[in-house]
Image (cartoon, rainbow, N blue to C red):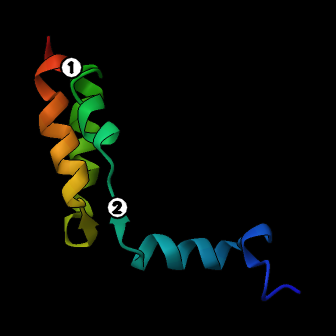
Amino acid sequence: MKEKFFGYIPYGEDDFKELWDNADIVLDANILLNLYRYSEKTQKEIIKDIEKLKERLWIPYNTADEYFNNRLNVIY
């Protein structure tokens, strides 16, 4: 049963470490758009973290499309 419903079983500390060390990170448009809404300090912290993960980041086409379609509205 655990194999069928593994999503309901909490990860152990080793499992979390493995995920954070190796998993691909997929951003959505809100992550990118919210950068305009945060304070400058928070923006810099998030960008620094994104830079650390840049080799593992993936931005889907639809995410980029949504970002560019909404960017100016968020800035205003």
Q: Position of residue 69 (x, y in %)?
A: 14, 33
Q: Is residue 31 above or below residue 37?
A: below
Amino acid type, residue under disc 1 in the picture: Val
Q: Is residue 37 above or below residue 47?
A: above
Q: Label 1 neighbourhood size at 10 Å, few (<14), some (14-19), many (20+)? A: few
Q: Position of residue 7 (x, y in %)?
A: 72, 71
- Between 9 and 22, the one lying in front of the other is 9
Residue positioned 75% across, 78% down in the render: 6
From the image, tell me which residue sits under label 2.
26
**For residue 25, side relative to residue 16 (left or right):** left
Q: Position of residue 45 (x, y in %)?
A: 28, 39
Query: In the picture, residue 55 is in which quadrant?
Result: bottom left
Extreme top residue here?
Answer: 76
**The label number, if any, that marks residue 74 in the structure image:** 1
- Between 41 and 53, the one lying in front of the other is 53
Badge 1 element: helix
Residue positioned 17% across, 49% down in the render: 64
**The label number, if any, that marks residue 20 in the structure image:** none
Amino acid type, residue under disc 2 in the picture: Val
**For residue 29, side relative to residue 19 (left or right):** left
Residue positioned 22% across, 41% down in the render: 66
Residue 10 visible somewhere in the drawing: no
N-terminal label among 2 and 1: 2
